[in-house]
Amino acid sequence: MVRLSLVLLLACFSTAYGQRFGGIEIGAKGVKWVAIDLELGDARNPVTIVDSGDENTTLSALEGPSFNLDALGDTIQTVGGFYRRLHEELQVPEHQIFIVVSSGLPKAENLQALKDGVAEFTKHSLDVLSVEEEVRLGICGLCLQEQDRLGEALVIDVGSGNTKGGYLVPAAFKKREAITTFHLPGTVTLTTAVETIAADRHVDFCQASLEARHSVLKPDIDRQLQRHEDLESRRLVYMNGGVVWALSTFLHPEMLEYANVPLRLDELHQIRDALRKANGEYPTVDASLLNAAATQEISIVKKVFTPENLMAGSEILCTLGETLDFEDRAVYFVRNGRVAWLLGYVSAKGQESQVIQ
């Protein structure tokens, strides 16, 4: 049997089941949803984001080994509301709505209660993604339009609960397709670690973030990445995740319409230093770069991330950039990266049923 190409596979799948798909992701910072259309006639740009949204929840703040019951109930209600919106308002067929739990969500003892609650509201089962599964889906989704770059792209997703990264070694280069992954602290995870250091050492958040960089983040990155000698060959880096979007918005508000925003290591140092000097406030933005849309986008960033979250995220990006020599690579924030897992998930579902004999 010969497998279809990813774009053709999606086309066949959407022909059989309709073009609109929806996804709901339960992560450490909250619940995200997205509706997409697959454009069959446009192989270069087959995906249109119809609508998307998110709602912050406190599900990741565990009480001992379990989810807080109030946060658990709120999350289930939120998922149910997003599900109804996708199906009733946006006309996504129920069997084309996929609900997943991110690998960054803590593995609580009452995870089954989350699964049962979501199933009661939506009649859908939850897929709990592993780091490897999430990275694989993200790579396939991000490289949907450039499949010839699968063998050279490194994908890094800086989430709230964890930072996931990896790359694919396609079957053309080995006997079978392989995937290499690494995982590191996420934005909220590192923020919590910094706050703990600040409280224990009686220092401010900025000083504590420096200590966390050297005691928590850098050793973890070195330990994870030293195992992957062929990382050097990945000259193309696709980055996504909420904090990458947030920092890119502060750095390049004039690139709001860009699908891929180039990022340089010196720019990441610049935004980190600005956050350190801001003393718990948000960094200032060059007014000449702002228009109404950019101003609104920055206001959205401020609703989602605290200055402390942004500082923790900038430490993650800078440490990764220094370790991986970002100055010698082409690094991009992929604006539509938030739907990458869904594209990969849809393609995986298509592979289960669409093959050429």
Image: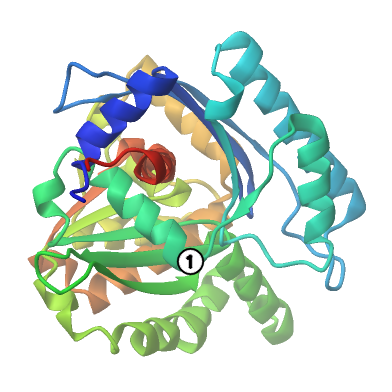
Indicate whether 158 appears above or below 343: below
Q: Quadrant of residue 30?
A: top right
Under circle 1, the secondary element is helix
Residue 5 percent coordinates (x, y): 18, 41
Residue 302 visible, this orientation: yes
> Furthest residue to the right?
69
Q: Is residue 65 left or right of residue 15?
A: right
Disc 1 residue type?
A: Val
Q: Is residue 25 left or right of residue 5?
A: right
Residue 195 percent coordinates (x, y): 66, 71
Q: Quadrant of residue 17?
A: top left
Its colouring scheme is rainbow
Residue 198 percent coordinates (x, y): 66, 77
Residue 277 visible, this orientation: no
Q: Is residue 17 left or right of residue 357?
A: right
Position of the C terminus by quadrant: top left
Residue behind mark 1? 131
